[in-house]
Image: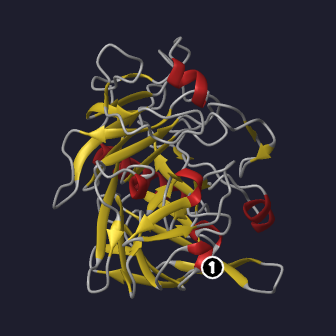
Amino acid sequence: MELSRRTVIAGAAAAGIAATAAGGTAHATGGRKPVKELFGKLADGTKVYRWSLENGGTRMKVLSYGGIVQSLEIPDRRGRYENVSLGFDNLDDYVASSPYMGALIGRYGNRIDKGRFTLDGKQYQISVNDGENTLHGGAQGFDKRVWDVEPFAEGSEVGLVMHYTSVDGEMGYPGTLKAKVTYTLTREGDWRIDYEATTDKATVVNLTSHVYWNLAGEGSGTIEDHELSIAASRYTPTDEGLIPTGELAKVAGTAFDFRRAKPVGRDIRAAHPQLITAKGFDHNWVLDKGITSRPEHIATLRDPSSGRTLRIATDQPGLQFYSGNFLDGTLTGTGGRTYRQGDALCLETQHFPDSPNQPSFPSTVLRPGQTYRTTTVHSFDA
């Protein structure tokens, strides 16, 4: 029998109290002020810190480098904790090797065709770092910047407020963009991300989070048996460079139909040209709800073996589902195990890829006097 999350958390807390009585370490489930420690230094001597947060039965470690979620621990149906996000145990691997693992993504998440776009009649050439295209902001995107971090513990919530200023011309983007991202752990154990940004010149912006999920536990093996549902009737097919063609294709009758939950691996090797090009799923789903004024539930991921469930709500119009196609066994994670193809997946809430070059897609233009705001909520259950 599966237990409710409240029962599981209560059980974990009781186990922690018992452990304390026996001389062990307790794991409290209530909110507490985030704890800061030095994680490492960059080549130029810049210090990188790690913040440990805990609330509502969820435990998280976040780096000031890239706003990276190094680990995120939640209990299974029996109250046993596992880290369900991929990451590294040292700064050097994040700097040298990380495929955006756990990071904040900006100034523009996903791809822009040939790193070019025209805004108000002027063409901009931005950093190209994915073949001939731009991916996740360019060669030195927000994932490779050190953020200013302010911890908070207010009422029943704890979290971090992170700031980064991207100057005019950085990676080729116009305008000085002041970004603010808040990570909050609620008393229910939800992880909420609130993104904000302002600019002094018209620009494009599309911020997201790039956590690699494996609900059975980091380094435990394939996620092909995870069950996924996405509330989307269409997706955006891509060309060979994974740039959207502009079409909003129907998922009905294809491997891309996740409107009802199914194992990730059920159709991943179907003879579909889009799956062959991307070596699996690496596409944007057009959410049925569109852009909304507040987050609405759009996807559920469940690991049958542990009972852990992730539910995602967002106000954004798209969800990039990436099935870990380019993990190749060369990276070693926090648990000392290598990451192979399909050992994790990403669910990135966002606007559509290449929107600056696709007039029919929702606009990603931000102008002076406007504030970019968006929220995504990750809820966990067992």
Viewer can see residue 188 = yes
- Residue nearest the viewer, comparing 93 with 221: 93
Q: Is residue 143 above or below residue 236?
A: below
Corner quadrant of residue 324? top right
Percent coordinates x, y for residue 105 in the rendering: 52, 63
- Residue nearest the viewer, comparing 113 with 143: 113
Image quarter in which the N terminus is found = top left
Tell me: 233 left or right of 171.
left
Residue shown at 40% from the left, 69% from the top: 119
Q: Which residue, given by chain and number where applicable, does mark 1 sit on?
A: 146
Percent coordinates x, y for residue 209 in the rendering: 47, 58
Q: Dot 1, crowdedness within 10 Å: few (<14), some or many (≥20)?
A: many
Residue with the most extreme left position: 293
Image quarter in which the C terminus is found = top left
Corner quadrant of residue 367? bottom left
The kind of residue tagged 1 is Val
Percent coordinates x, y for residue 9 in the rendering: 37, 51
- Residue nearest the viewer, comparing 290 with 85: 290
Residue shown at 42% from the left, 18% from the top: 255
